[in-house]
């Protein structure tokens, strides 16, 4: 607490000096400096209020003898009054100075002075006496007139900017770049005022013909911050313009999304979907330039985490939201698929983009085989492969990972010989770094496991130990190895779909979950399965009930 007190005293002296400088000069440089410090000053006011509310008015004046000067300077600064919640916090601070039972004339004068300052703040705008008399003569009170005037000024400027955007190279009718830049600077402290929205939107959409960006970086940053914190709501076209014109804002929006995902409950795709849709990023990503930046940040996260399942699941949910936004925007693609996925085969991207719901279930197997053929050609046939190599093909495939999960179900529900194409698809999905020989070995292991599971599905008795034995069919001793992860997911699918598996499901999972990491993996698998069934309209009440019960029980143990 003592350190906090020292820090506040130091901050107090700093801001007192700043306010004095701002009060003495009204140059462009001073205005810029004010705008740059508005957020920090508001935070100082908030800390000051937290300290003041714990004291009586006499203690406040003893501790901060010049508090009246500081608050007065702030109250007469239009930039501070217009910024975010500063006006409200200033009112709170002033109220802390009021003596409810004044004992002398000095305290009564202080109360009167505070009431005058509060009246000034609440009037919001000050006009010359002649203007005030004129508006009163027309029968308008300031409380009616000022907001209407502000609104009309904003609409007039917004209209002028729109005309400026349409006039193009007609320099005689265009607004000077210096004026546009000045407008963006003036708007910084006003961003969160509802009446300013049309002007903010017009500034973002208005593109000049200058070689360099004319809008101030502080303007972009302030707008982006207000959007992320839900303090303003702009049309999607304006948000897209913001992120196209100012890359740091788009990057910050992605980092803001990552922070929310990290702080949220692990392995809950419905919540992840809500966060992603709420971010407006999937809708904005309909523009290829934005999609490429977002996708590149996902790629970096994937590489940094060594292909963490949570990152893969997030990429898949984002892609699903992006595809939905793409379909809503236009039934026909405005941009070629190559602009979204430049390093992979357009024919492969086109097949993966198809929603399984739009394909009859009887044709799912054929589609999966086609996907496998296209991927295998890109990965193994270097003469026709993509210029990005196997990783790019895998990175594209995981965007639409629901197809891979369908492979396991198709193999388990079929009594026929497992198609080589599907075995390869699973082996590639789980082990993209594997060489051809290692992938072939994984396919042999998976085929053997499927054979055992098929035989066990026909057995009248089934035990957890039997399935545990099947899980040990792989030669890998590392439980985190791709082949072992693939076999675990096959066993989990078997437990959900085979009637005999329901009675021993919990015992099998208990034997399987050797570590917390594998437990989280199983939770993620069950959550993804339920999420996908719901999305595809797959109805299996018994299997769904079992998956929910297992998921609930596992979550209570981690």
Image (tube, rainbow, N blue to C red):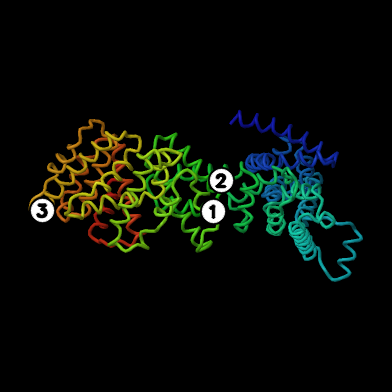
**Which of the 4 image quadrants contains residue 12?**
top right
Q: Earlier in the sequence, mark 2 or mark 3?
A: 2
Residue placed furthest toward the bottom: 139
Q: Residues within 10 Å of mark 1 (few under 14, many from 20)?
A: some
Q: Which residue is mark 2?
A: 253
Q: Residue at x 72, y 56 (%)?
A: 199
Q: Which residue is mark 1?
A: 280
On residue 458, the disc is 3
**Which of the 4 image quadrants contains residue 366?**
bottom left
Label 2 – label 3 distance at C-alpha = 53 Å
Q: Is residue 152 above or below residue 369?
A: below
Report if residue 99 is visible in the image. no
The quadrant of the rendering that contains the N terminus is top right
Label 2 – label 1 distance at C-alpha = 9 Å
**Lateral position of residue 223 relative to residue 540, left or right:** right
Report if residue 531 is visible in the image. yes
Q: Is residue 475 above or below residue 263?
A: above
Q: Residue at x 27, y 42 (%)?
A: 486
Q: Residue at x 69, y 33 (%)?
A: 11
Kindly state the secondary structure of the residue where label 3 is placed. Answer: loop
Q: Position of residue 160 (x, y in %)?
A: 78, 59
| Residues under numbered marks 2 and 1 in contact, where contact means CB atoms less than 8 Å apart | yes
């Amino acid at each position: 607490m003592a350190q906090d007190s020292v820090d506040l005293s130091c901050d107090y002296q700093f801001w007192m000096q700043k306010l004095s400088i701002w009060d003495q000069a009204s140059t462009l440089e001073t205005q810029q400096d004010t705008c740059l410090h508005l957020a920090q000053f508001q935070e100082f006011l908030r800390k000051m209020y937290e300290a003041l509310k714990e004291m009586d008015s006499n203690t406040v004046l003893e501790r901060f003898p010049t508090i009246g000067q500081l608050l007065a300077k702030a109250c007469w600064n239009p930039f501070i009054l217009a910024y975010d919640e500063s006006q409200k916090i200033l009112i709170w601070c002033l109220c802390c100075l009021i003596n409810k039972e004044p004992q002398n004339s000095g305290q009564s004068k202080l109360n009167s002075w505070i009431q005058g300052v509060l009246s000034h703040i609440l009037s919001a705008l000050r006009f010359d006496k002649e203007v005030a008399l004129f508006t009163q003569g027309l029968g308008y009170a300031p409380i009616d007139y000022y907001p209407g005037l502000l609104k009309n000024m904003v609409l007039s400027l917004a209209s002028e900017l729109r005309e400026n955007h349409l006039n193009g190279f007609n320099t005689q009718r265009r607004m000077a770049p210096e004026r546009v830049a000045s407008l963006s600077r003036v708007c910084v402290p006003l961003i969160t005022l509802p009446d300013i929205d049309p002007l903010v939107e017009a500034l973002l959409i208005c593109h000049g013909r200058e070689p360099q960006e004319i809008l101030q970086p502080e303007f972009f940053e302030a707008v982006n911050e207000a959007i992320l914190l839900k303090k303003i709501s702009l049309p999607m076209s304006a948000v897209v313009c913001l992120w196209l014109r100012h890359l740091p804002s788009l990057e910050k929006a992605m980092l803001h999304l990552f922070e929310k995902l990290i702080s949220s409950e692990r392995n809950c795709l419905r919540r992840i979907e809500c966060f992603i849709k709420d971010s407006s990023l999937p809708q904005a990503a309909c523009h290829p330039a934005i999609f490429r930046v977002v996708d590149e940040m996902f790629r970096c996260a994937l590489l940094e985490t060594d292909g963490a399942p949570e990152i893969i699941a997030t990429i898949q949910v984002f892609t699903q939201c992006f595809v939905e936004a793409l379909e809503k925007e236009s039934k026909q693609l405005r941009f070629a698929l190559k602009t979204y996925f430049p390093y992979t085969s357009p024919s492969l991207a086109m097949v993966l983009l198809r929603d399984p719901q739009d394909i009859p279930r009887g044709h799912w197997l054929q589609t999966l085989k086609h996907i496998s053929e296209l991927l295998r050609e890109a990965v193994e046939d270097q003469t026709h492969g993509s210029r990005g190599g196997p990783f790019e093909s895998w990175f594209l495939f995981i965007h639409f990972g629901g197809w891979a999960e369908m492979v396991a179900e198709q193999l388990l529900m079929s009594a026929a010989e497992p198609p080589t194409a599907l075995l390869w698809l699973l082996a590639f999905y789980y082990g993209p770094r594997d060489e051809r020989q290692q992938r072939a070995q994984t396919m042999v292991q998976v085929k053997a496991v499927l054979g055992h599971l098929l035989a066990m599905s026909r057995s009248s008795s089934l035990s957890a130990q039997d399935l545990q034995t099947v899980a040990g069919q792989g030669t890998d001793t590392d439980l985190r190895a791709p082949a072992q992860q693939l076999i675990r997911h096959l066993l989990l699918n078997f437990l959900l779909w085979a009637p005999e598996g329901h009675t021993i499901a919990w015992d099998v999972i208990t034997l399987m979950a050797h570590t917390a990491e594998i437990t989280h993996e199983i939770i993620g698998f069950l959550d993804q399965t339920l999420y996908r069934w719901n999305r595809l309209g797959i109805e299996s009440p018994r299997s769904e009930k079992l998956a929910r019960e297992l998921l609930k029980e596992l979550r209570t143990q981690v």
